[in-house]
Image (cartoon, grey):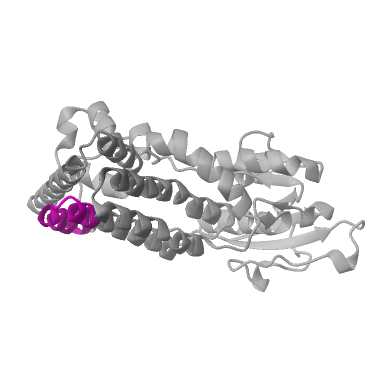
Amino acid sequence: MVRRVVILADESAHWRVAGLRQLDRLALEIKEWAAHRAERAEIFIDWSADVAPAARFVPCHPRLSPGDFVSPPNDIAEFSIGTRIFLHRNRALEAAATGPPKVGDDWEILENPAQIPACEKRFLRGAGKPQDGLVSRFVNRPVSRALTRTLLHTSITPSQWTLLIFILPLAGSVFLARGRYSDIVIGLLFFQLYSILDGCDGEIARAKHLASPRGAQLDTWCDTVGNLLMVLSLGFGLGRLGEGVAVALLIPTNELLLAIPARSARGTPAGATAATLYPRQRRLLDGGGLLFFGERFTAILLQLTKRDVALVAFLLLALAGLPAWILHSLGAVAAVSSLLALKSMAGAQRAR
């Protein structure tokens, strides 16, 4: 099915909000909205007579093509939307397709460019993920969002940012390998800074419609390699290289086991709890037995083992003069997680 949409463009089509021109953002939102419905969008741009022909343009973005735009449609368009509307979430288009929506959390009207900074702040407040841990939600995200506002007005891509900040875990590993109290604390501060700035690539991707499986995979690989560098360099610095190597082997083993799909034997939590879990965490509940302790206890436990919370806990252990417990706790969590993944796989095999 083809969805025909008219964009009413005036001078606001050129306004850049969160890194994209208004006309480009609307075209992208319309195309993604139609794709989500397994449909195709035909977009007609109806320029205001006040805009000189030389100032008119066709949106240009890697996810748009000339075939997305048409001359005046033969059939009546399903709805029209103006370039002064800034969409926070594309479900606002669903309301626009059925009638004039009310201004709310999903979208707002920009009367003049002076409103753009406040609009960007409101937009980026919703740029987090429901899976964010407590530290990410209340500490990391406010910092990363402030930086992302600046990065959105540059040409840097999410993947370029992912690779650029990878220098932080490399530098942190050098300090951890020295093994002295102050060096270990400094090294973990580098990893904490990396955790904060690591949120920017996803925020850029979502704001500029550049999210992709390849970018997400690169981010995951950098995080995993960073974790391995941390345990190996800390083990070396503490004279516990054997334990560091053992933990470093457990971490990718656990990731591989969690990546193997298995049918649910007992189900996973529903509602708000399910929304806070990454797919890998759902695998721990997918027949692993954690739900035996109750959904609320399980949700709290999984929150405490998220990366953002764990890094703060590691820094506190280092400050308390107990850096060896970082290796102990990482190894224990990876081992238990691997056992739960194996149990889930075994349960799925028996159920077949």
Residue under the point 42% across and 65% down:
214
Q: How many marks?
A: 0
Q: Percent from the top left, x then y, of residue 167? A: 41, 60
Please give the range of residues in magenta: 231-258
Q: Main secondary structure of the magenta part?
A: helix
Residue under the point 26% across and 39% down:
318
Q: Is residue 220 above or below residue 280?
A: below
Residue under the point 46% across and 33% down:
138
Q: Residue furthest bottom?
A: 66
Name the residue nearer the viewer: 145 or 44: 145
Q: Quadrant of the N terminus?
A: bottom right
Q: Along the horizontal axis of the image, is 83 left or right of 260? A: right
Q: Along the horizontal axis of the image, is 186 left or right of 62? A: left
240 part of magenta stretch? yes
- Quadrant of the rendered image containing residue 251: bottom left
Name the residue nearer the viewer: 263 or 275: 275
Q: Along the horizontal axis of the image, is 284 left or right of 206? A: left
Q: Percent from the top left, x then y, of residue 331? A: 15, 47
Name the residue nearer the viewer: 153 or 103: 153
Q: Percent from the top left, x then y, of residue 245? A: 15, 58
Q: Quadrant of the C terminus?
A: bottom left
Q: Percent from the top left, x then y, of residue 107? A: 66, 40
32 part of magenta stretch? no
Q: Is residue 156 above or below residue 335?
A: below
Q: Is residue 32 visible?
A: yes
Q: Is residue 300 above or below residue 257?
A: above
Q: Is residue 37 visible?
A: no
Name the residue nearer the viewer: 81 or 1: 81
- Quadrant of the rendered image containing residue 321: top left
